[in-house]
Image (tube, rainbow, N blue to C red):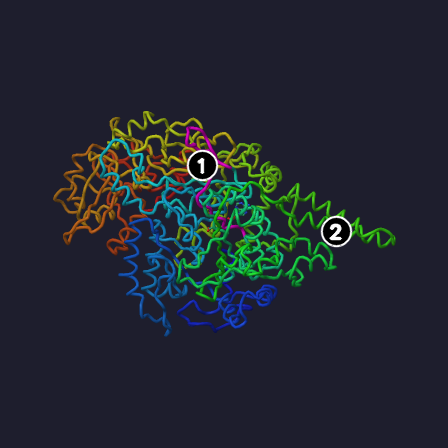
Amino acid sequence: MGRNKSAWRNEKKGGRGGKKGGGQGSGKGDRYAYVSIPSENAKYERYYKESGLIPEEEWDEFWATLKRTLPTTFRFTGSKGHALSVLKTLQEVYVPHLSGLTWEDQPVSPPTPLPWFPDNLAWTMTAGKTVIRRCPPFKRFQNFLVAETTVGNISRQEAVSMIPPLLMDIEPHHAVLDMCAAPGSKTAQLIEAIHAGEETRTEEAIAQDGPTDKINNGGRPTGLVIANDADYKRSHMLIHQTKRLNSPNLIVTNHDATWFPSLLISGPNEDKEYLKYDRILADVPCTGDGTARKNYGVWRDWSPGGAFNLHLTQVRILVRGLQMLKVGGRIIYSTCSMNPVENEAVLASAIDRCGGLDKVNIVNVDHRLPELKRRPGVTNWKVFDRDCVWFNSFEEVEKDNRSMERLSRITREMFPTEDYKELDDPTRIPLERAIRVYPHLQDTGGFFIAVLEKKMEIKTIKPEISGRKKMVAMAKAEAFKREKEDAAVGDTESVEIAAKDELDEDIEIPEAPATPSNPEPEELIPGAPESPIKRKLEIDSAPPTPLAIKKTKLETEVTVESEVDIEVKAEPEVIAEPEAEIETEADAISAEAHPMPSEPWASKKDESRYNTPAEGKVGRRNGGIPIEEPFKFLAADHPALNHIFEFYSLSSRFPRNCFLVRNAEGIPSRAIYFTCDLARQILTYNEGKNLKFVHCGVKAFFKQDVQELDVCPWRIQNEGLPIIEGWIGEDRIVRAKKRITVRGLLKELFPKVNAEGHEGDVIAEIEQRVRELSMGCCILKVGLGEGEEEFDQKIVLPLWRSRFSCNLMLPKDERRAMLMRLFNDEEEVVDSTNKNRARPRANTNSELPDGEVLPDSEVFPDIEDAAEVDPELEVQDIEGEKPDL
Ligand SMILES: C[S@@+](CC[C@H](N)C(=O)[O-])C[C@H]1O[C@@H](n2cnc3c(N)ncnc32)[C@H](O)[C@@H]1O
């Protein structure tokens, strides 16, 4: 945020330090002009120039590309049928209008698909911000992108960041762990993969007869994604980022991935066992030096020591992931760094610790994504120390006579061993199977990816040699040596033994990662506001908690002992903060999850999020530790569920045991959430074990104030609708075919039920059917029509039948997105009744004229969520909030 702002401010001022011109396609219309940020860092340049990683003949192009602003890339939500129709709109409506344009006499390119991404589902766009804001066809395109992003059909994501999930081959039954998930762009892809093909499978399942549906689970996936991040606030960004996907197959956790706890689930014989994952993503914290094209902080803060700091944490995360993986399962290790110390050295070290190639190997993925230009992982590299001295081996470090403090963080594991270099040695680790993506190859950021497969259970983990302990040992040894030399007595052998003892001791107690009481040297952790380096720092500088104290012991368990399933015992109880409240908090700190305010298609909502400091709405805390509401499952025969199943004639094949609420009493007082069976097992079997679950479940039903006793107060939430709609009985369904009906319902709030034959009768087609319906929630199903006036796609929307009107329960931004997509209508939604303006303070309907029911939570979703937790908050917030009319 800060970085980009300053970058653009600099540009307006004429810039400082940035080079001008050059590069392919440079011109006013394209982004291919050097941006005037100080894209200079002598050490960074020297490191990559002298590293030998980039062939000499490619250097100029590599370096020039790194200095250019990254093109904007975005992705369609592949698992949603809806999103595919949005892709069609892009291809058939927008691209033709954006082709062949010039701006200020310069050609401007239309968006094009990323050649290596399957099914044209990801696109790249080089048009600059000025063009997007000022050139009318691009401006219209921007509106389209904003609208579709808001409703979850499009996600803005850096191109290279899309690669790891594509190599995971996730299937709907997989248990997937995303160890370092925030802000969640890859998590979204993992969730989409879990839900791939669900729409078709569900339709087939619904069409089947029969009382039970155990085998195909009603078409729903049986797998699960667990998205974890060690940073509490960032773990809540995950909720925000994934919310648009409405997945019941998601749990968000907040643990340090180096000792991610083992989770109990049902075993095959009614017993319990620890969950092992089919797929794991370890997209670890890194220096992020491949992100210089979008992260100004890299230019400002890159230093050779950054990689040393992170190497050990990266190894530990990967080793813990390998422990938790099923035999035959795959873990993807990735970073947005190009430095071998954070990449190949980590792979080699983790494989070695796990027992070598018999246990874990690197999978050859050369044939995958054939259009992706890449370079193989390196088998030989040098290490550049903080004084910009190159070392070819650890022996050279040991011989160096500069102060130990200067060399302390360099460990043997950071170097290639001789056998990596022997390409024909079948026992060496095939590091060349990893993927290196360099910016100049396909106009992207720099990235590293490796796919690892677990071949056998890992029984023992080889210990690590800690840099810090080594430093102490070596410093002591050196001091001792000097002492001896000074005294002209002593033998060098005893000095070596002293050092060795320290190193051995190190094996017993691995080094704890940096904490406030164990800070990193400042030079090594520069704090660029949005840099990944800063992100690491944020975690390290979190207030000390009992959790941090516990770390050392648990890390010892992970890295030294045989594979022990970790059960967290000593952490203080952590209870969920009310989600809505935290989302607000997370909104303010979101650095990466959303388009930056300066992004041309960042929505207003996103911009305000960035402009709002994280203050005011602080969640409840217990001694600095966030308080989370527990997840309580409703009994299958709970009266609220009985009422719901009866009112909506919900099929008996729809599972009743996966509904939950978020309060300690387990009372369905406001919202009822739905999740999958594996998530249910995890949340119930691991309850009371101090695990930090921060999110699970899709809001399926919400309790509405109703005027009459026989009206079911449980209305279907829009986010839960896709999961439930197919199982609802005909009694609560209104069917339509005509475009005019859909448009009218989207365009107008509270259209009259009794306007038959009068002007403004927007629901003529369904009026009779709506009159027959009893009051309350129902669903509108628009079928596949063939006539000219009919719709050619399926739509299902929640509808509320009031005494005098029927109203779609959709937030305005969703109405706008649909109006734009389906009818190319960019005009405002109308409220012909004007009733919202006289909206009462609280969300009671009794004060409304004509007995209308306002779907409050749809108009004010955050407020209602917050109100669920604290009734006082409800009144205060509603008073303070201005309806967006
Ligand atoms: C490179 S980012 C992950 C990006 C993410 N996978 C995505 O695609 O949006 C690294 C994340 O790791 C988190 N992190 C840092 N140290 C961690 C640890 N020890 N355990 C778990 N997460 C950690 C950071 O908070 C940060 O969100």
Is any atom of residue 880 visible in this view? yes
Is 446 above or below relative to 314? below
Q: Is residue 265 magenta?
A: yes
Is 867 above or below relative to 816? above
Dot placed on the residue nearer the N-terminal end, 1 or 2: 2
Tag 1 residue: 578
Mark 1: few, some, or many residues within 10 Å (few <14, many ≥20)?
A: many
Write down the region rendered in magenta: 262-285
Q: Position of residue 284 (x, y in %)?
A: 52, 50
Q: Nearer the viewer, residue 5 or 782?
A: 782
Is any atom of residue 528 visible in this view? no
Left or right, 557 with respect to 869, comes to right
Mark 2: few, some, or many residues within 10 Å (few <14, many ≥20)?
A: some
Q: Position of residue 684 (x, y in %)?
A: 44, 30
Tag 2 residue: 475
**Residue in the image at 40% along x and 41% along y:** 224
Left or right, 809 with respect to 122, comes to left
Q: Position of residue 320 (x, y in %)?
A: 54, 43
